[in-house]
């Protein structure tokens, strides 16, 4: 299930911080919009598969940060659609950026698979000698790509 209800943002942001680590900055529930993919199990606690925190708002752009459980179970067409639909249609942004550590090969591959375009390398973005790549997606690129429509079962 994709959860967009912001009452759960503090829980999702704590989970995200625990997954990513403490060196990337704070995620404030008052400044972030969270979208999570959660699996519900009968008789057990819900299992968070992934969280996207959207923050660093400007008039035309925002930044996304993604944390997952390390599996590919979280990724679905509906999850991607929900995230992009919020940014480009509901928040009316024209650009969505992501900052990724240069040594995070899995995240780089995921961003490229999603159609995010490499923009630049930021030296020392995550501290001295810890560079980052910026990936981004524009509204036009999203509308022309495969993630701009919900799955047939969601329509």
Image (cartoon, helix red, strand yellow):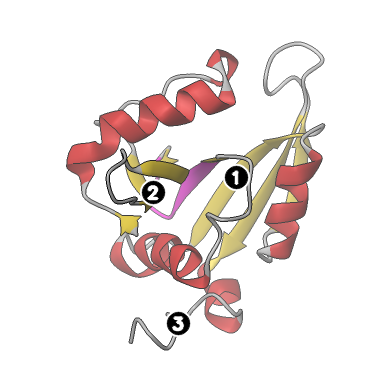
For label 3, the crowd category at 10 Å Cα-Cα, with few meaning under 14, some 14 to 19 and many 20 or more, is few
Query: Marks 3 and 1, Cα distance to the nearest angstrom?
Result: 24 Å
- Towards the viewer: 74 or 124: 74
Residue topped by disc 3: 151
Q: Which residues are magenta?
A: 57-66
Going by the picture, which residue comes out furthest to the left?
7
Q: Are marks 3 and 1 in contact (CB under 8 Å)?
A: no
Q: Quadrant of the N terminus?
A: bottom left
Asked if residue 142 lies in the magenta stretch, the reply is no
Q: Earlier in the sequence, mark 3 or mark 1?
A: 1
Q: Earlier in the sequence, mark 1 or mark 2?
A: 2
- Towards the viewer: 17 or 88: 17
Q: How far across and down, in percent of the image, does residue 21 sit? A: 57, 19
Residue topped by disc 1: 98
For label 2, the crowd category at 10 Å Cα-Cα, with few meaning under 14, some 14 to 19 and many 20 or more, is many
Local SS, label 1: strand
User: Is 97 located above or below residue 148 in the figure?
Assistant: above
Local SS, label 3: loop
Q: Quadrant of the C terminus?
A: bottom left
Eye-nearest disc, 1 or 2: 2
Residue topped by disc 2: 36
Left or right of 31: which side holds 27?
right
Q: How far across and down, in percent of the image, does residue 56 sit? A: 43, 37
Going by the picture, which residue comes out furthest to the front?
43
Q: How far across and down, in percent of the image, does residue 17 sit? A: 47, 24
């Amino acid at each position: 299930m994709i959860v967009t209800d912001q009452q759960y943002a503090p829980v999702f942001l704590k989970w995200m911080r625990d997954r990513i680590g403490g060196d990337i900055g704070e995620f404030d529930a008052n400044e972030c919009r969270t979208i999570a993919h959660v699996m519900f199990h009968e008789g057990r606690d819900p299992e968070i598969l992934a969280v996207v925190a959207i923050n660093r708002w400007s008039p035309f752009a925002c930044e996304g940060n993604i944390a997952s459980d390390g599996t590919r179970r979280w990724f679905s067409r509906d999850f991607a659609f929900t995230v992009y639909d919020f940014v480009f249609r509901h928040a009316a942004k024209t650009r969505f950026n992501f900052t990724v550590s240069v040594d995070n090969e899995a995240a780089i591959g995921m961003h490229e698979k999603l159609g995010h375009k490499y923009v630049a390398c930021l030296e020392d973005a995550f501290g001295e000698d810890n560079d980052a790549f910026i990936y981004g997606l524009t509204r036009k690129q999203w509308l022309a790509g495969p993630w701009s429509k919900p799955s047939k079962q969601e329509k």
